[in-house]
Image: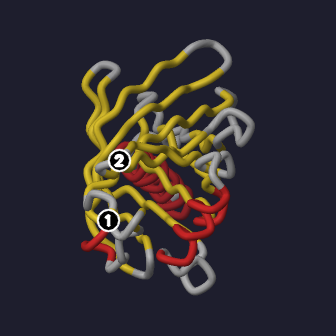
Amino acid sequence: MTAFSYQKLTACLLLVGTGLVSFHQPAYRPEPVKRKLMADRTKSTITYAMTHPMHSFEGVSRDVACVIVIDDANRIESVAAATKVSSFDSDNTNRDSHALEKMEALKYPKVTFTSNDIQQQGTNLTVKGNLTFHGVTKPVVIQGTRQDDNSQVTVKGDFDINLSDYKVEKPSLMMVPVDEKVKLKVLLVFKNTDS
């Protein structure tokens, strides 16, 4: 009878101990669901706008590689983008070849951006990150908007840079250089699907 009681007592203690361990385990929480969206290269562009005392002009790149990560609250968590310097087209081959020379496109073929902080208020975005251009990395702030519909997410934004900050010699026309400031505008279109 004594052996039976010890077995019963041991079994009860094991059951109680298992219950206590189970009780103190944190509840199962699934990992947050994140989505990674790639920019549609047929719809996305990066445009630069420059001014010269004689005229203003723009160049457009339609070769934009960009990915955003959207968190489980449907907010943009991070962004990374790149484009080739040689992909910009201003509808003037002479100007484009001169710009490639000044930007040393063979030595520094890409422009890249990586975010480090994104704030979203309604459809308005403030994206802070690092822009690498002409071998120089500088922090930039992009003000923009986000528009969602059933099939796509569209992000638009703009920011200014100074050529001297990136050690780029200003192109000139008739011995007169362009203005220091360059406005960059982004239009990024993402197919709104889970990946």
The reply to whether residue 56 is in sight is yes
The reply to whether residue 118 is in sight is no
Percent from the top left, x then y, of residue 47? 50, 44
Residue linked to disc 2: 54
- Which quadrant of the figure contains the C terminus? top right
Q: Which residue in the rendered view is the most extreme toward the right?
A: 42
Q: Are marks 1 and 2 in contact (CB under 8 Å)?
A: yes
Q: Quadrant of residue 27?
A: top left
Q: Quadrant of residue 174?
A: bottom left
The amino acid pointed to by label 1 is Val
Q: Residue at x 33, y 52 (%)?
A: 52
Question: In this view of the protein, which residue sits in the foreground, 10 or 74?
Answer: 74
Tell me if 172 is positioned left or right of 141 in this view.
right
Residue linked to disc 1: 176
Q: Residue at x 48, y 48 (%)?
A: 15
Question: Is 49 above or below relative to 95?
Answer: above
Q: Which residue in the rendered view is the most extreme toward the bottom?
A: 107
Q: Secondary structure at mark 2?
A: loop
Question: In this view of the protein, which residue sits in the foreground, 177 or 77?
Answer: 177
The amino acid pointed to by label 2 is Met
**Marks 1 and 2, how far apart at CA:** 9 Å
Tell me the tag on residue 142: none
Question: In this view of the protein, which residue sits in the foreground, 13 or 129?
Answer: 129
Q: Secondary structure at mark 1?
A: strand
Q: Residue at x 64, y 41 (%)?
A: 39
Question: In this view of the protein, which residue sits in the foreground, 9 or 68?
Answer: 68
Q: Which residue in the rendered view is the most extreme toward the front?
A: 174
